[in-house]
Amino acid sequence: MCRVSWMIVALASLAGSAVGQIVQPPAKAPAAAPILERQVTPLAHIEKRGAGPIPVVLIPDMYFDWTVFETFMDRNSDRYTMYAVTLPGFGGSEPPPLTKDDHPGQQVLLRNAAAAIAQLIRDEGLTNPVLVGHGMGGNIAMRVAIADPAAVGRLITINSTVAVALGSPNAATPLSERAQFVQDTIAPKLWKTPQREWNLRNRSMLTAAVKDAYRAHQLATIAESVPLRTGVLYNLEMFSSDLSPEITRIQAPTLVIACIPDLEHPMTSKEQIRESVRQQHTGIPGGEIVFVEDTRHFIMDDEPARFDTIVESFASGESVEGAQDL
């Protein structure tokens, strides 16, 4: 598995579904459904900044709030009109309510997040906005583009997953039959995780997710503020999620940003990371991918100038240096 979802990697190990272990789930998962058939829990926060001509919606990764994009917003206030969001359950907010009959395979929280982003686009009257999603935020951005192709002008994902691999990146791990396995095998182990162990694993992963040690500490503190229940619920839905049958419906020009870390993974080579990310996204029509070498998950902190240039080029409809067709 590549480093595109640092929290998912940590929790896969915690749940006993380690990288490199090929899993054969026993039951077929329901198809991904970006549309929510219940009242939408609104976004916890929308931070609007800038007065530029291009509207940009910024969606953070799991556990984080809008502030992970704050320095990007400060640097680009003349270029874009930006809406950085905090998803329900993060930033001190409550997650969407679940019923006793809900289970991770239904992906209620992820579908709610996509519906709430779509509502933001409608409420603000945004025309052809650029959606920028980091980690899980990229998965949610894809859901918006799948559900309402006309609502999205351009789509940028950063270290995101179409479906979390439950085995090694070059193994033929089934990605369509997973919900029952997650519910029966992964969920019980995650729910039994002590809070202290949960926090230690998160903090350990974050030390490898950004180069600056103090920034890693800041991010870990934010992650630790999220209740364990909320974290488990979102993670189980990500484990259950598989957008691969739907990504062919994305019509917006799409750029996949894949960070290739300066650190060597003990079980996955950098070339395997590249191939894994490429394979996951090859179904996106007309999509492009750019590999950013020697940077970690939080590219906006590690390589701010490079990140700004990539976003500016793609958002403006120009060629991105180093981008390749998927």
Image: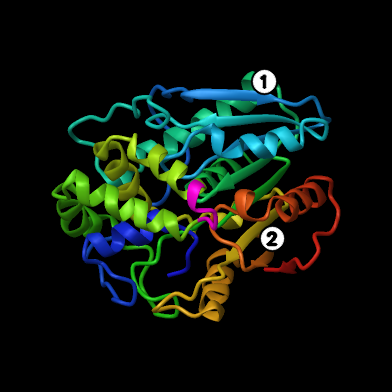
In this rendering, would 106 be left or right of 36?
A: left
> Seen in the image, is 80 located left or right of residue 147?
right
Label number found at residue 287: 2
Q: Earlier in the sequence, mark 1 or mark 2?
A: 1
Residue that badge 1 annotates: 124
Which residue is at 78% across, 52% downward? Answer: 309
Which residue reaches farthest front? 214
Three-letter residue code for mark 1: Glu
Q: CA distance from mark 1 to mark 2?
A: 27 Å
Please tell me how crowded label 1 is: few (under 14), some (14-19), or many (20+) other residues with Cα within 10 Å.
few
x 77%, y 31%: residue = 77
Viewer can see residue 147: yes
Relative to residue 181, is residue 277 drawn left or right?
right
Mark 2 secondary-structure assignment: loop
Left or right: residue 182 compared with residue 43: left
Rendered position, 122 above or below 211:
above
Horizontal and vertical percent position of residue 276: 51, 72
Q: Which residues fall within the magenta stretch? A: 210-214
